Each structure stands twice: as structure tokens, then as C-alpha cells.
Image (cartoon, rainbow, N blue to C red):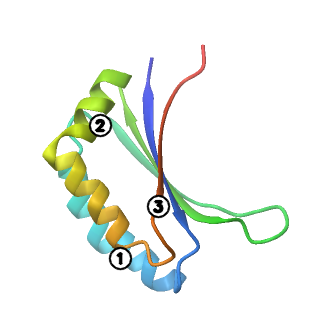
Amino acid sequence: MAAHLLILYPQPTDAADFAKAYRDEHLPFAGPRLTGATAVASRKIIGPGETPPFHFLSDVTFPDIDTLQRCAQSAGGQEALAHAASISSGGAPTVLGTVDAD
């Protein structure tokens, strides 16, 4: 069963600066450190009404929860998560682990 590491970024102080940092700095930095990941999907969050509390979502897919947990606990995984926090100008990102429903 696939597992997902979700990184939810709060609204940034400057959306254009965040987009540039995510694309040009974070993806090249974090990608090689996410051992076992099979895919990354990046999504801008929009709300049906008011401005949502989160601006952006990164969904890193792993083949199973054990692989996700090994990556998240590894030095490379910790470096990638720290870098994610360093580009998040609106506050610390929320990090969640999920698995696909049966």
C-alpha cells in the first residue's frame, strides 16, 4: 500500500519568492535526499471561498509506510525537511504521513 509524506506550506509572505525558492532551490536539494520516493506532486492550494490556511502542498509518494519512515528518519530526509522549513516564509510547514485507503 502506497504511503505519502505531505508537506503543507502556510501562506507565504511573498508567493512569487516562495514559488521560486521551491522550484529552484528546494526540489533540486530535497529530491536526491528522499531515498525510496517514487514520485513527487506539487500543488497550489486554492479555496472555494476565503484564503485557505495553506498555500502549497508537496506530496512525496513511497511504496509503503516502512520506506517513508526510513527516509523521514534518515539524515537525508531530515535535511530535506529542514530545507522545506527554511523556505517557508509564512511559518513552519505541517508534515503528515498518510497511506492509501483500502
Residue picked out by circle 3: 93
N-terminal label among 2 and 3: 2
Taking depth in this image into account, of 101 and 86 the one nearest to the observer is 86
Q: Residue at x 45, y 35 (%)?
A: 4
Residue picked out by circle 2: 37
Q: Is residue 67 above or below residue 72?
A: above
What's the residue type where badge 1 is placed?
Answer: Ala
Residue count near mark 1 (Cα–Cα under 10 Å), binned few <14, some 14–19, many ≥20: some
Taking depth in this image into account, of 60 and 11 the one nearest to the observer is 11
Instruction: Kindly check if marks 1 and 3 are in contact, taking CB atoms under 8 A apart as contact.
Output: no
Q: Quadrant of the C terminus?
A: top right
Q: Residue furthest right?
A: 49
Q: Is residue 59 above or below residue 80?
A: above
**How many discs mark residues in the rendered view?**
3
Q: Residue at x 32, y 71 (%)?
A: 86
Taking depth in this image into account, of 13 and 18 the one nearest to the observer is 13
Q: Position of residue 38 (x, y in %)?
A: 32, 35
Q: Residue at x 37, y 40 (%)?
A: 39
Which mark is on residue 21? 1
Q: Position of residue 46 (x, y in %)?
A: 70, 64
Q: Quadrant of residue 62?
A: top left
Q: Quadrant of the N terminus?
A: top left
Q: Position of residue 2 (x, y in %)?
A: 44, 24
What's the residue type where badge 3 is placed?
Answer: Pro
The label nearer to you, 1 versus 3, is 3
Residue 75 vs residue 55: left or right? left
| C-alpha separation, residue under disc 1 versus residue under disc 3 | 14 Å
Residue count near mark 3 (Cα–Cα under 10 Å), binned few <14, some 14–19, many ≥20: many
| C-alpha separation, residue under disc 2 versus residue under disc 1 | 21 Å
Q: Is residue 82 above or below residue 77?
A: below
